[in-house]
């Protein structure tokens, strides 16, 4: 199940260098310059292709993310897409929200399964560092911190 979630997260282009890919995902959702909630949900579901067990959670995350993105986009650009819709900036906020939702879901799922005692890879550690930075715990160099914490061995929680 985790592999499916990771694959979906990878399909959400949130990096600065992924602007062209982000435009392509936007265009999957709508041919217009703005989109409504149902267009965003349907388009992202088509793009991400969740499995049966993932579809309900993902759909709910997209709906919640749309509302939050709409509020944030309006606050940061008051002359934006208008009520009930998102332009490209709001869509970016939406896919960031959905990607973070997936990453946090995976961390919580791992903890609930009792696998937090399993070794954590350098990539997983870097992802966690990105999430906790949003909570005010900043790790400047994730690779160096990973090396220092595991002492050349494995890092377990």
Image (cartoon, helix red, strand yellow):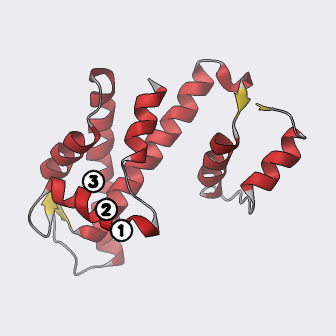
Q: Report if the CB atoms under discs 2 and 1 are less than 8 Å apart.
A: yes
Q: Is residue 36 above or below residue 19?
A: above
The mark that comes first in sequence, 3 or 2, is 2
Crowding near the residue tagged with mark 1, few <14, some 14–19, many ≥20 C-alpha atoms within 10 Å: few
Instruction: Give the residue at x 83% y 47%.
Output: 147
Residue behind mark 3: 66
Report the quarter where the C terminus lies: top right
Task: Please identify the residue farthest to the top as the structure is shown.
Answer: 113
| Residue 18 x %, y % | 40, 64
Q: Is residue 91 left or right of residue 1?
A: left
Q: Is residue 121 above or below residue 65?
A: above
Task: Please identify the residue farthest to the bottom as the structure is shown.
Answer: 79
Residue behind mark 2: 22
Residue behind mark 1: 19
| Residue 23 x %, y % | 26, 65
Label 3: which secondary element: helix
Label 1: which secondary element: helix
């Amino acid at each position: 199940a985790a592999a499916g979630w990771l694959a979906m997260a990878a399909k959400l282009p949130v990096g600065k260098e992924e602007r062209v890919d982000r435009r392509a995902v936007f265009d999957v959702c709508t041919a217009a310059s703005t989109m409504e909630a149902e267009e965003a949900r349907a388009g992202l579901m088509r793009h991400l292709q969740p499995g049966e067990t993932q579809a309900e959670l993902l759909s709910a995350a997209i709906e919640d993310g749309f509302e939050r993105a709409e509020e944030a986009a309006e606050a940061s650009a008051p002359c934006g897409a208008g009520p009930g819709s998102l332009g490209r900036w709001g869509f970016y906020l939406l896919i960031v929200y959905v990607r973070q939702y997936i990453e946090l879901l995976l961390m919580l799922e791992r903890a609930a399964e009792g696998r937090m005692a399993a070794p954590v890879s350098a990539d997983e550690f870097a992802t966690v560092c990105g999430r906790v930075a949003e909570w005010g715990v900043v790790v400047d160099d994730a690779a160096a911190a990973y090396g220092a914490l595991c002492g050349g061995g494995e890092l377990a929680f």
